[in-house]
Amino acid sequence: MQGSANLNLMKKAARKVGRALVKDFREVENLQVSSKGPGDFVTRADREAEKMLREELLGGRPTYGFLGEESKETDGADPTRRWIVDPLDGTTNFLHGLPHWAISIALEHKGDIIAGVIFDAAKDEMFWAEKGGGAWMNESRLRVSGRRSMIESIFATAIPFGGKGTLPATLQDLARISPVTAGVRSWGSAALNMAYVAAGRFDGYWARGVQPWDIAAGIVMVREAGGMVSAIREGDDPLVKGSIVACNEPLFEGFRKVVRGE
Ligand code: IPD
Ligand code: CA
Ligand code: CA
């Protein structure tokens, strides 16, 4: 499957930054044992990765806007298109030498996400999707899982850390969801949670307090893999409200009800 020129630009940028981050990740593994730890090094690597993505993406499409986690938003001459980028999603995993992190790049057109790339560089898994073109991992077509029963299904979420305000609600979610499922995973990368739902590895994902760059690429990926995505509350936009439910179609309504506590 051949993607559009935009998609090829996104993949090329993700690969370039992926190579740099894999080198940095090896260094982080060495720094674990040093007394200073890898904190400052990772902060620098993260910022450098976003700088590279900005150069690549705006170099290729100078009129587009740019929203990245590490820098402030830049308006483009074309107000209808913008890149939404997380240079390193799963920073805490990266910092701890855990190979579960990704580069996430989305292209938004008139408020709609039309293409997404989530690159797990440590495992060389390039997840990509384009509206109307399906969802893919490397050269394989992706489909969400076919499970129809919650009790056989695995759901991903984020257990908030560091005193985040979303912790009490998430703990209540867990008390409702864990007993009626085959398990909940909190692996520390929102982007990969979405990619894994698209790949049928997780049956669904929900989260509160997510940012547009965490989920934008994943939205088109899950939908193109045949799944459904919405905010937790009916009618809200996940990119604006920062809450998300992503799931295969048979489980979606039931799962969203459990998430809402209905
Ligand atoms: C975080 C991860 C994490 C999610 C947090 C995000 P970062 O992104 O996606 O899984 O629970 O809400 O902030 O900081 O690693 O880019
Ligand atoms: Ca993130
Ligand atoms: Ca990040």
Image: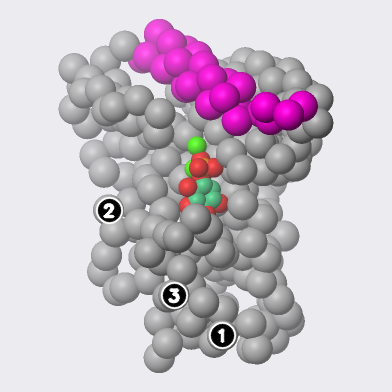
| Quadrant, the N terminus | top right
Of labels 3 and 2, the one closer to you: 3
* Residue occupying the point 29% across, 59% down: 241
* Residue occupying the point 35% across, 57% down: 242
Hey, what amino acid is under mark 3?
Answer: Pro
- Specify the quadrant of the image occupied by residue 204: bottom right
**Type of secondary structure dominating the magenta stretch:** helix
Find residue 175 and name its label. 1
Of labels 2 and 1, the one closer to you: 1
Judged from the image, the secondary structure of the residue bearing numbered disc 2 is helix
Q: Categorize mark 3 by other alpha carbons within 10 Å: few (<14), some (14-19), many (20+).
A: few
Q: What is the span of residues highlighted in magenta in the rendered image? A: 34-61
Judged from the image, the secondary structure of the residue bearing numbered disc 1 is helix
Position above or below: 182 against 14: below
- First of labels 1, 3 by sequence position: 3
Whether residue 45 is visible: yes
Hey, what amino acid is under mark 2?
Answer: Val
Whether residue 131 is visible: no
Give the residue number, with chain letter if any, for mark 2.
240
Do callouts 2 and 1 mark residues in contact (Cβ within 8 Å)?
no
| Quadrant, the C terminus | bottom left
| Residue nearest the viewer, comparing 40 with 176 | 40
| Residue nearest the viewer, comparing 164 with 156 | 164
Hey, what amino acid is under mark 1?
Answer: Ala
Give the residue number, with chain letter if any, for mark 3.
168
Position above or below: 241 against 214: below
Judged from the image, the secondary structure of the residue bearing numbered disc 3 is helix
Q: Categorize mark 2 by other alpha carbons within 10 Å: few (<14), some (14-19), many (20+).
A: few
Residue 14 percent location from the top left of the image: 58, 24
Residue 90 percent location from the top left of the image: 60, 43
- First of labels 2, 1 by sequence position: 1
Label 1 CB, ligand 1: below 8 Å?
no
